[in-house]
Amino acid sequence: MAAKVPQAARDAVIGVWSEPMTYDVERGAVLRFVRTLNDEGPRWYADNEPGAQSSDGLAVPPTFLVSLFAGPHKADWKNPYEGLLDAGTEWQFFEKVRVGDRITVAARITDMTDKQGRVGDMLMVTTEFRYTNQHGKLVATQRNTVAWYEPEARKA
Amino acid sequence: MTTQAHYDGITEGTDLPVLVKHPTRRQLVMYAGASGDFNVFHYDQQAARGVGLPDVILHGALKTAFLSQMLAGWVGEGGMLRSLTVRYRDLDLPDTPLFCKGRVTRKYVEDGHHLVACDVWTENAQGAKTITGQAVVELPSRLAHSP
């Protein structure tokens, strides 16, 4: 198995943090997310009721944070693969994120490993995401691993 | 209004309430928009088949969101999902039901937090596990607040 991504390219990208990106957690974005899960309840529409409690402060679904993208990576690797499969994810949650919070996210690749699998030669890439709130508190981390592969090998 | 689960009422070996999802192609497009994951394999059948997939496939993160929905619904407003680790074992396709399941494996107190560990998984219509993983949730304890 020949490594398609040279070690020097890996060394240049692994461990390098992206630019941070900051987002206001607003009801519309959260509502679009919960709708995709068919998880919307009356609390998300409370703002529409006269005199009702604001949706500010409502806890968002834990993995809503996937919709908050990190900023551009300062280092790039020329990805020669076309196929992409999710391999796994590890979430840790330290504090609930609520509508009205301001979340900053940054990411870095922590590992790139060649592997032989059902779809042939694969490159397993693990990315760590760190989510921090407006008080500077780390509210969640995510370690996401994807498998890049050659489509021809899967079709064979 | 659902009843709040409490740590004291949890028994190791108990099955969590099953959450049944019926993902559709429309839902995959909605999730792409809501999550920002516009990988074509989730909405373009021709592109999916071009990389050897049988059809468009569910986003892994959507399936994880289903599992976290099951867990968040179970622990209620007074509880909290603390960790969720999943491995994607197989693909899932739209227009077929997906069953989100879990089982309590351990309950313990750590630094004053009342924690419950669970095995979690998704099953397809054939009964095969397409995600396996572990979760830890924190629940309120009635006893902790007793005088």
Image: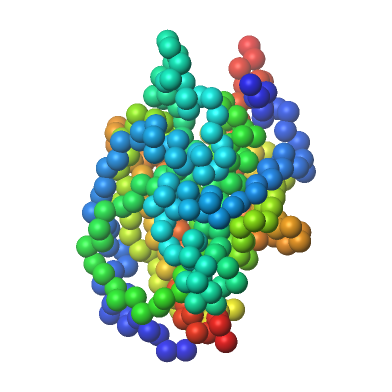
Q: Is residue B42 above or below residue A11?
A: above
Is residue B147 found left or right of A125 in the rendered image?
right
Q: Position of residue A22 (x, y in %)?
A: 27, 42
| Quadrant location of the C terminus of chain A in the rendered image | bottom right
Residue A99, visible in the rendered structure: yes
Looking at the rendering, which quadrant does residue A13 occupy?
bottom left
In the foreground, A1 or B54: B54
In the foreground, B40 or A73: B40
Q: Is residue A154 above or below residue A13?
A: below
Looking at the rendering, which quadrant does residue B25 occupy?
bottom right
Q: Is residue B118 above or below residue A8?
A: above
Q: Position of residue A144 (x, y in %)?
A: 45, 59
Tell me what residue is drawn at x 73 percent, y 28 percent: B9
Q: Given the current orientation, which residue lies at the most extreme bottom position?
A: A2
In the foreground, B85 or B144: B85
Tell me what residue is drawn at x 61 percent, y 17 percent: B145
Q: Position of residue A8 (x, y in %)?
A: 28, 80
Tell me what residue is drawn at x 33 percent, y 59 percent: A108
The way the protein has been coloured in the rendering is rainbow
Tell me what residue is drawn at x 52 percent, y 67 percent: B45
Q: Is residue A71 above or below residue B81?
A: below
Q: Position of residue B68 (x, y in %)?
A: 57, 43
Residue A94, visible in the rendered structure: no
How many marks do you count on the picture? 0
Is residue A122 found left or right of A101 in the rendered image?
right
Is residue B147 found left or right of B11 in the rendered image?
left
